[in-house]
Image (cartoon, helix red, strand yellow):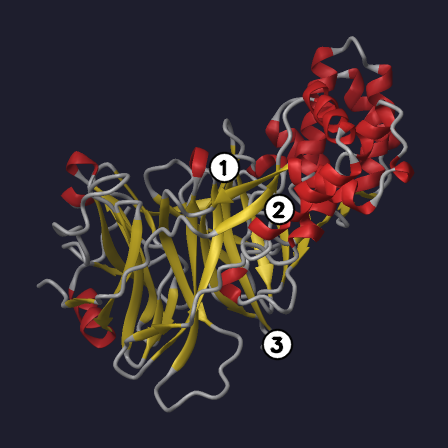
Amino acid sequence: MPVTVTRKDILFQPDASRVIARFLYQTDERAIELIYRILSLTEKQQHEMLTQVLRDYSKRHRSISRIFEKHYTRLSPLFRQYNIDPLTLNAVQRVLIGAYFTMEYSIEAAAFFNPSIMEDPDQSELAAGEKRVIISFRATGEGHISSVVFRSGIIDIRNNITIEPIGKMLESPEHIKNHTYHKTSFLRKLDEMQDYNKKAYQVMMDKLTDTFTYEELKRYVEETRMLMQDDLQGNIMLNEMMWLASSHYEMDFSVDTAISERVIFPIADTEMKGIEDARFVRFVSDDGEVTYYATYTAYDGVSILPKLLLTKDFYHFKVMPVHGEVAQNKGMALFPRKINGKYAMLCRTDGVNNYIAFSDNINIWRQASLLQTPKYSWEFVQMGNCGSPIETPEGWLVITHGVGPVREYVLGASLLDLQNPEKEIGRLANPLLMPNDNERNGYVPNVVYSCGSMIHNGNLIIPYAMSDYASTYSTVNLAELLSELKNQPAVSG
C-alpha cells in the first residue's frame, strides 16, 4: 500500500542576483598587457575609474576593495617575471589592477538542487516542538560549475519550515593549505590513480620524508621537475602529485557572515568543474562529540574524486580526499555513528547497485559488500542512496533512488538491521515519491532527488530537487512508513 506523502508548498529556486567575486585570468601575455594599459592612465584617470568601480560594486559585495587587493596579490609571480616592482605602485593602482582581474559569478543562476537537511548546532531560543535546521544545496551557475550553499530556518511542530532572511553579500572562504601529509598513505592513493614505474617517482620517493607539508611537496616537485624536463610521463606524475595534494585544505568564513552567505566554491584542481551532491550527516562519536560530515564528489572535467568535508560550526571546514578501492564512484553516504566499533558507509562502486562498507579510518575505504540490487521495475536501470541512513528504533531507515523507464528518477525507502546493517529488513515495493506534473520539467526532466533527510516530531522530512532545477520538501509519517517497510519483504541481493 502506498505511503502517504505530504508535499509542502515552499520552493527553493535559483536566484541570479546571488554573485561572488572570482579571480579572472587568461594568459600571462594578456595579463601583462592589461597591467601596462592600466598603469599608462594618468593618476586622475586611475582614481576616477576606481571610484566608479567601488560605487557600482561596494553594495554587491562585502569589502570589495579587500577582494580586489587579494586578486592583485595573486599577480605577484607575473610582476617578478616582468621585473615590475610592486613597491612602486600606490594603493589606488593596486586595487584598480585587482578590479580588472575580477569577475562576478552567479553561483545559482542555472540550478538550485539536491538538498540535504540537518539539525543546526544552535538550538537556543526555540518554542516547544521547533527545531532550527540547516539545508545544504548544490548551486550551479555558468559553465555548470557546482558549489555548496546553505539556508537556515526553523521547522515548527506542524513541520512547516520558515527560512531566515537570505543574505545577498556572498562570501568565499579563505583558502589555507596547511595539511600535513603522511608519505605512506599519500603514495598509496597516488598508486591507485596510476601505476608509476618512472624515474621521477623514485626521485620523489627519496625526497619525501615520513610527513610533509603542501609547501614542502611543492618544493620537492619543482626540484624534481628541473631534472625531468624532457620526461613527459614523469611530469604527468608530478602534476598528479600536486593535483592530489591540493585536495587537502581547510577554509574559514568570517564570523559576521550569515550561513546563507557562505559559499563553498571549487578551490582545488580536483574540483575545478564542480562540487557535486554533498550528503551531510550529523555524526556522533562514541564519546558524544558531534561533527558534521559531508561526502561529496569533486569533478575536474575528466575524473571524479570522492571527498570528505567536515565542520563543527559551519564557519571552519576541513576537506580531504577519500582513499581506497571503494572510493571510486559517486554517492557515498556515511552512517551517523560507528557500528560495532567501525565507521560505516553506503556506496555504489559499480554505478548500479548499493553496497555497504566498514572501516577503522573515516577516509580510507578498502572493501564493500553488496547490499541491494535493482528488483522493482522503477529501479531496473540503477539504484542508489539519497543520503545517510537515519537511525530509528526499528532499524536504519535509508531513502533510496531508483531509475526506471525514460530515465525517471524516483525515491524509495529501505530498512536495515540496526546491529547488522548488511541485512535488509524491508524495502518498499512502490516508490515513496515520484515526479508529478509540476516537478518533471526542468534542466534534467523526470527527476526527484535528495541528499539527506531527517526526523522531526514523528515525521520524516525529505528535502528534494525537482528535475535538477529547483527544490522543495515533503513529509511522511514515520510510524506509517516503518509499518509499511516491516510488512514488505526484504529483497535479497
Q: Tag 1's secondary structure?
A: loop
Q: In the rendered structure, which disc, 3 or 1, sits on the residue that comes first in sequence?
A: 3
Pair 1/2: label in front: 2
Please name the residue that numbered disc 1 is placed on: 328
Frontmost residue, 409 versus 103: 103
Distance of label 3 from label 1 (alpha carbons): 31 Å
Residue 93, image x, y percentages: 78, 40
Frontmost residue, 81 versus 49: 49
Please name the residue that numbered disc 2 is placed on: 52
Label 2: how many Cα within 10 Å (few below 14, some 14–19, many 20+): few
Residue 167, image x, y percentages: 48, 64
* Label at residue 426: none
Please name the residue that numbered disc 3 is placed on: 287
Amino acid under label 3?
A: Asp
Residue occupying image coordinates x 23% and y 55%: 412
Would you identify the image quadrant in which residue 413 lies? bottom left
